[in-house]
Amino acid sequence: MEQIVAKSGKTTRVHQLAKQLGVSSKDIIAKCEAEDIPGITNHMSAVSLGLAATITEWFSGEGGGTATAVETAAPVDVEAVRKKAARKASRKKAATGAKAAKAAPAAPAPPATEAPATEAPATEAPPTAAPIPAEAR
């Protein structure tokens, strides 16, 4: 698996890690909050390579092997998280397809025939009210 690394070379971003694992950034953030890991607040938060390895282990879904990450919160249901991320991606694709269908007209509109121009009758300005005498105010 290819490791995606941020510009500094020592960290990666949550969104890059989420894309690599095929899960939502929100799921990674929620798991980090459940584990009381400070500094992981949004998709652009920097994740050290060691923490990235731990998160990868949490979301890899591989049951056997030696666990190096100590989890204090409930384990992640990897299949459910990946299905949720896949549903969101398919909705996004369907929405962009619907927008493209709306943008392209189904059939060309027939040419409009021009009606002869008619002049509107001139209207007079409405009469103005007489000024109110100062005594009546």
Image: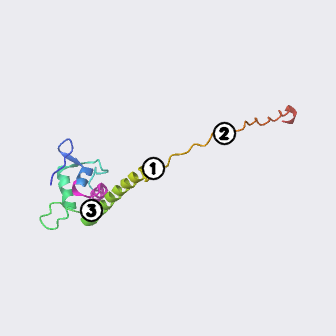
Give the structural element (helix, strand or loop) at label 3: helix
Do labels 2 and 3 touch, CB within 8 Å?
A: no
- Relative to 16, 137 lies left or right: right
- Relative to 130, 10 lies left or right: left
Kind of residue indicated by mark 2: Thr
2 or 1: tag closer to the N-terminus: 1
Seen in the picture, residue 127 relative to 63 is either above or below; the reply is above
3 or 1: tag closer to the N-terminus: 3
Seen in the picture, residue 91 relative to 128 is either above or below; the reply is below
Q: Residues within 10 Å of mark 2 (few under 14, many from 20)?
A: few
Is 106 one of the magenta-colored residues? Answer: no
Q: Which residues are magenta?
A: 20-35
The residue beneath circle 3 is: 82
The residue beneath circle 2 is: 118
The residue beneath circle 1 is: 108
Q: Quadrant of the C terminus?
A: top right
Do labels 3 and 1 touch, CB within 8 Å?
A: no
Distance from disc 2 to disc 1, alpha carbons, whole Å, reads: 29 Å
Q: Looking at the image, which residue sits at the far bottom?
A: 64
Is 25 one of the magenta-colored residues? Answer: yes
The residue nearer to you, when weighing 14 against 112, is 112
**Residue at left offset 19%, top offset 46%:** 5
